[in-house]
Amino acid sequence: MSGSKFKIVAGLGNPGKGYDQTRHNIGFLVVDDIALKSHLSFDKSRFDSEYVKDTIKGQNVFIIKPLTYMNRSGVPIHKFAAYYKVNIQDIIIVHDDMDLAFGKIKIVKGRGHGGHNGVRSILEAFGKKDCIRIRVGVGHPGSGADVTGHVLGRFSPDEITRLDQCIDTASDACLYLLENGVTAAMNVFNTNRC
């Protein structure tokens, strides 16, 4: 991560109470936890996002939650990045991932969207894929299953018992990444499981 005066940490999700505790909103839950650990609250809005700006782990960071719905997440993140001159390499995206078992965390950089519509929107908005992503596993419903219903569905009772630990690990991964860089964070968290 280099070059920009600011870093952006963006959690992906859908706005509105109806989506609050759904698998697709785990990105929102993780950035809420980052703010909580940093004694911050999302008290500002700009570019169709809720956000907070502060110094975290020695970095000037915007933590943002796009409010445009998942499929259009790239538009507000790109507006933030353009306005504050943040390079895509200095953007961390936190999002749900069906290709990972529930609770598994994987940090990647410069990868394709993997079928995730929120990530697809971001890569299309920037025209490149050099951002860092913290993929938070929400499990897959199985072949032929209702994928949309799965990601927009609420956590199962078993998942709820592990949800706090999962969110805690993912937010720790982001904070560690801000302080120590992406390679070190991958080495620590890509072998971990909540």
Image (cartoon, rainbow, N blue to C red):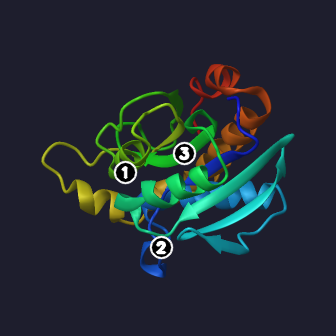
Q: Residue at x 39, y 39 (%)?
A: 127
Residue flagged by tag 1: what amino acid is it? Ser
Near mark 2 (Cα within 10 A), the count class, few <14, some 14-19 or many ≥20, is some
Q: Which of the two marks, 1 or 2, is nearer to us in this view? A: 1
Confirm whether residue 43 shows in the render.
Answer: yes
Q: Residue at x 80, y 47 (%)?
A: 60
Residue flagged by tag 3: what amino acid is it? Ile
Q: Residue furthest left?
A: 144
Residue flagged by tag 2: what amino acid is it? Pro
What's the CA distance linking mark 3 and mark 1?
12 Å
Kindly indicate whether the residue at mark 3 contacts the one at mark 2 (C-beta within 8 angstroms): no
Decide: is 156 above or below 4. Answer: below
Where does the image place residue 142, in percent across and percent down from the top left? 22, 44
Please name the residue that numbered disc 1 is placed on. Answer: 121
Please name the residue that numbered disc 3 is placed on. Answer: 93
Q: Which mark is residue 15?
A: 2
What's the CA distance linking mark 1 and mark 2?
16 Å
Kindly indicate whether the residue at mark 2 contacts the one at mark 1 (C-beta within 8 angstroms): no
